[in-house]
Image (cartoon, helix red, strand yellow):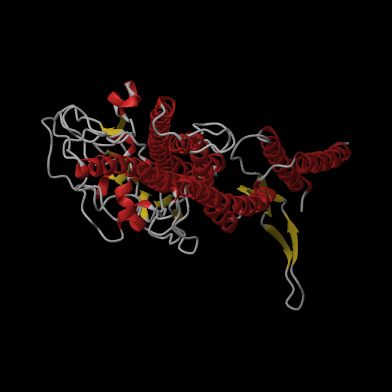
């Protein structure tokens, strides 16, 4: 090989080392960049120059230098898929754990919140509705005890309404989260589609769109936290994405996720725009969406069983929807009465039990319903007993002859009639009794104390005939009912937190394993920088030697 040709070998070393130094500097400058993937220079050999050929020996060839092949990303596709799946599962249980903590706070079990238990019973301080009943039973004709009974009943129903309304407010907050998550999904999908086109355009030539791929991988990571995704990359660099088994990004199109707003609750239901059926349009030509239109286009099926075996416990959006539920639950639904007021077998287990907030609403509302209706029934029975003995008796009756009821139903503003069903949100304390508690004299017509009614009130709080839900067989009294409700939340919280902790460990292990491949190490990059700098210097020195040799030859021959 001529000396002149040898110069090109040195030049190839200079160029390759320079590219490697640039890549190393790029890695160092993106040391803290979110989603950045470490890049590495791939080197290869240039063509060989054959000097001689021998039939029985190897050919004599001279290398023409090093060749810069490409700058590749260091990624492990299997680790990426496993990490994204487990990150989505961790996000699911993160939401569930936070929801349990929020419900416990609302009930006041963290020494904050509404402290509802004190409104029902407070053995330590001798307070609550149960304490008022006990004091009333000691001296039912005492105006002090009567006033205490009515006052504690008022505090009880006020705190109960505050608890239930706070649960509803929490549903509304989660509803806002649903909207934000759906907007993020659409934004991620649109950006992935834009990046797909940019990557295909760049990589249609000799370059590699590594930084664009970094951004796309970051978006896939974020998308995986919101729901279950699958994806595949075509040879030309286009990534197709499926979200919850439906195409989200494919063939240059983005399947937009829309939100249907329930007219009663305002709750959002995510659905696929391309899968919905539209049969009505407004005057501007925009489709009018109803619940029937999106029946087959809903993104999530909230009646499916949550299981890691079937990968149905992935994504914070799904977990938020499950925790929120799709309406405000009431006591009727524990008895399999649907929202239309009709009996539907299995309604509770299918539609209520899996929702953390709705299940708490239904069980809590059932407790309030039982207490309120039981007290009202006892007062009505006492009035009826007195009337049975003396038809002219006005014992525990108002001016119209109706039995006094400690609790009343709210009046519907539209119809002007009392609402139906004794639920937390439509119960009020009797204003007449609130203003004049002594109307509950508990003194019979013959001027004796009504001890029978007092015993009935005490028995109502002590008899164990109530269950939390159809899946619980052990009957309890009012006090133990609330304790069991709280214990049930605590047990569920312990389970969710245990799963969350295990998932966090598994996800972190995958994250660290992936980080060892994709992450930038300053020590390693500095080592590479020194290596490539020395290689650059060596190539430069090689060129100088060849130059000196050429100079010597030309000077010698020129004489």
Name the outermost residue toward the front.
446
Total marks placed: 0
Residue 315: percent from the left, percent from the top?
A: 47, 48
Q: Quadrant of residue 245?
A: bottom left
**Can you say whether 340 is above or below 423 in the image?**
below
Residue 368: percent from the left, percent from the top?
A: 37, 41
Q: What residue is drawn where x is 35% and y is 42%?
A: 453
Q: What residue is drawn where x is 41% and y is 41%?
A: 185
Q: Which of 4 and 236 is in front in this view?
A: 236
Q: What residue is drawn where x is 30% and y is 34%?
A: 407
Residue 249: percent from the left, percent from the top?
A: 38, 48
Q: Nearer the viewer, residue 215 or 56?
A: 215
Using the rendered image of the protein, determine whether residue 392 is visible from the camera's viewpoint: yes
Residue 153: percent from the left, percent from the top?
A: 39, 32
Name the outermost residue toward the bottom.
56
Quarter of the image where the C terminus is located? top right
Q: Which of 247 and 429 is in front in this view?
A: 429
**Can you say whether 480 is above or below 543 in the image?**
below
Name the outermost residue toward the top.
435
Using the rendered image of the protein, determine whether residue 173 is visible from the camera's viewpoint: no
Name the outermost residue toward the left.
283
Left or right, 57 with reference to 97? right
Left or right, 444 with reference to 125? left
């Amino acid at each position: 090989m001529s000396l002149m040709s040898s110069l090109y070998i040195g030049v190839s070393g200079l160029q390759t080392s320079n590219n490697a130094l640039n890549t190393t500097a790029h890695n160092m400058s993106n040391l803290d960049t979110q989603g950045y993937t470490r890049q590495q220079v791939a080197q290869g050999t240039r063509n060989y120059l054959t000097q001689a050929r021998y039939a029985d020996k190897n050919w004599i060839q001279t290398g023409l230098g090093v060749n810069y092949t490409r700058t590749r990303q260091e990624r492990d596709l299997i680790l990426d898929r496993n990490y994204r799946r487990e990150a989505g599962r961790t996000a699911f249980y993160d939401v569930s754990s936070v929801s349990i903590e929020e419900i416990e706070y609302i009930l006041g079990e963290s020494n904050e919140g509404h402290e509802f238990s004190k409104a029902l019973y407070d053995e330590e301080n001798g307070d609550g509705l149960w304490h008022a009943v006990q004091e009333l039973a000691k001296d039912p004709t005492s105006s002090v005890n009567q006033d205490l009974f009515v006052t504690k009943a008022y505090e009880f129903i006020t705190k109960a309404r505050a608890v239930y309304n706070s649960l509803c407010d929490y549903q509304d907050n989660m509803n806002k989260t649903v909207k934000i998550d759906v907007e993020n999904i659409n934004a991620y999908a649109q950006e992935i589609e834009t990046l797909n086109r940019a990557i295909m355009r760049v990589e249609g030539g000799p370059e590699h769109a590594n930084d664009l791929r970094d951004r796309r991988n970051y978006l896939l990571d974020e998308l995986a936290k919101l729901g279950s995704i699958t994806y595949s990359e075509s040879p030309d660099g286009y990534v197709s994405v499926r979200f919850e088994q439906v195409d989200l990004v494919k063939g240059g199109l983005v399947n937009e996720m829309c939100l249907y707003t329930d007219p009663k609750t305002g709750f959002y239901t995510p659905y696929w725009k391309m899968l919905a059926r539209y049969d009505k349009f407004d005057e501007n030509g925009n489709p009018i969406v109803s619940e029937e239109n999106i029946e087959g286009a809903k993104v999530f099926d909230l009646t499916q069983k949550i299981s890691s075996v079937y990968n149905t416990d992935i994504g914070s959006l799904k977990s938020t929807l499950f925790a929120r539920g799709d309406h405000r639950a009431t006591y009727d639904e524990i008895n399999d009465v649907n929202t239309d007021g009709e009996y539907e077998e299995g309604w509770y287990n299918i539609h209520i039990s899996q929702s953390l907030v709705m299940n708490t609403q239904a069980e809590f509302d059932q407790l309030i319903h039982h207490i309120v209706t039981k007290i009202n029934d006892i007062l009505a029975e006492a009035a009826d007993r007195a009337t049975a003995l003396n038809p002219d008796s006005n014992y525990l009756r108002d001016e119209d002859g109706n039995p006094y009821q400690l609790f009343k139903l709210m009046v519907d503003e539209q119809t002007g009639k009392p609402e139906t069903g004794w639920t937390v949100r439509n119960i009020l304390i009797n204003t007449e009794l609130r203003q004049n508690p002594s109307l509950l004299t508990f003194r019979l017509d013959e001027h004796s104390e009504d001890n029978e009614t007092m015993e009935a009130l005490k028995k109502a709080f002590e008899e164990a005939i109530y269950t939390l839900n159809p899946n619980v067989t052990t009957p309890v009294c009012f006090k133990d009912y609330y304790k069991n409700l709280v214990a049930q939340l605590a047990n569920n919280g312990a389970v969710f937190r245990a799963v969350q902790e295990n998932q966090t460990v598994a996800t972190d292990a995958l994250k660290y394993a992936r980080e060892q491949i994709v992450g930038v190490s300053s020590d390693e990059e500095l080592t590479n920088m020194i290596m490539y700098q020395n290689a650059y210097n060596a190539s430069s020195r090689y060129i100088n030697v060849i130059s000196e040799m050429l100079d010597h030859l030309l000077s010698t021959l020129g004489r």
